[in-house]
Image (tube, rainbow, N blue to C red):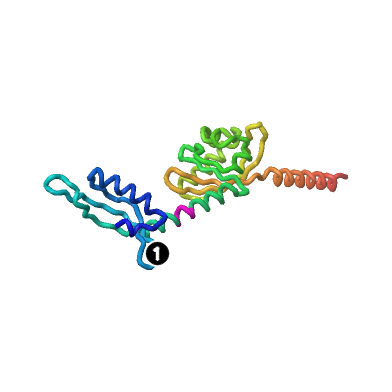
Amino acid sequence: FFDLFPPEHREALKLEALAVFARKESFIHFPNYVMRKDGSLLHVETSGSPVLDAAGNLLGYRGTDTDITARKQFEQALKASEERYRSYVEHAPFGIFAVNSQRRFVDANPTACRMTGYGREELLTMAISDLHPPEAEEATRIHFQNLLAGQTSRVEVPFRTKQGERRYWSVTATRLNADLFLGLTEDTTQRRQAEEQLNLLARRGQAMLEMP
């Protein structure tokens, strides 16, 4: 029985199994490995019941093995995918916020924290309305209503950082499930300032042309 365990796991699994045998206990879904004749490994779950003689002495165990290799491979692939996704989020050049249906923050990546000036733990105690000035409430309310209706929504609104600086953000958001919404945020302050400067110059130029 123990010879089927791969060498690198054999002693640890043997000790765990012997401890169960000593207690004469039944067990279910004991995760372990089986090494096949060709050297490949199977992930299995073993369930067993003790076989006792009339005096209660342990004669052995009878049980079954269930091959869970495919499930383990899927779980490992999923974990790797989640780790890659988390890495993308953590290193994204734009702010990523997750909020619930009450418009409260439930997650934020490092870029989002830098944009707001707040730490992640601080943001998790806040709502969207804590960041935008009162005049942006209507735009953000309509934006969120679109999300509740299942639409991807984009809005550009002013926000205030922890330091009190007024900035403009472009927020593109989508609904992930009934109580989770994801927003991708870019700081558009410099672009807006450049556009305002160009508009000012254009108005001045037009005024000069209209002078008698």
Q: Give percent across and percent down for residue 169.
A: 63, 43
Estimate how packed mark 1 is, as few (under 14), some (14 to 19) or many (20 or more) residues with alpha carbons within 10 Å. few
Instruction: Give the x, y percent position of residue 117.
Output: 63, 36
Q: Residue at x 65, y 44 (%)?
A: 187
- The secondary structure that most of the magenta stretch takes on is helix
138 or 71: nearer the viewer: 71
Of residues 181 and 158, the one nearer the viewer is 181
Residue found 57% across the figure and 40% down from its top: 139
Q: Which residues are magenta?
A: 77-81
Give the percent coordinates (x, y) of residue 131: 58, 35
Q: Is residue 174 magenta?
A: no
Q: Nearer the viewer, residue 124 or 165?
A: 124
Instruction: Please give the count of numbered marks on the rendered protein.
Output: 1
Looking at the rendered structure, the secondary structure element under dot 1 is: loop
Left or right: 53 in relation to 208: left
Q: Residue at x 37, y 49 (%)?
A: 12
The residue type indicated by label 1 comes to Ser
Task: Return the residue found at the far right.
Answer: 212
Q: Which residue is mark 1?
A: 40
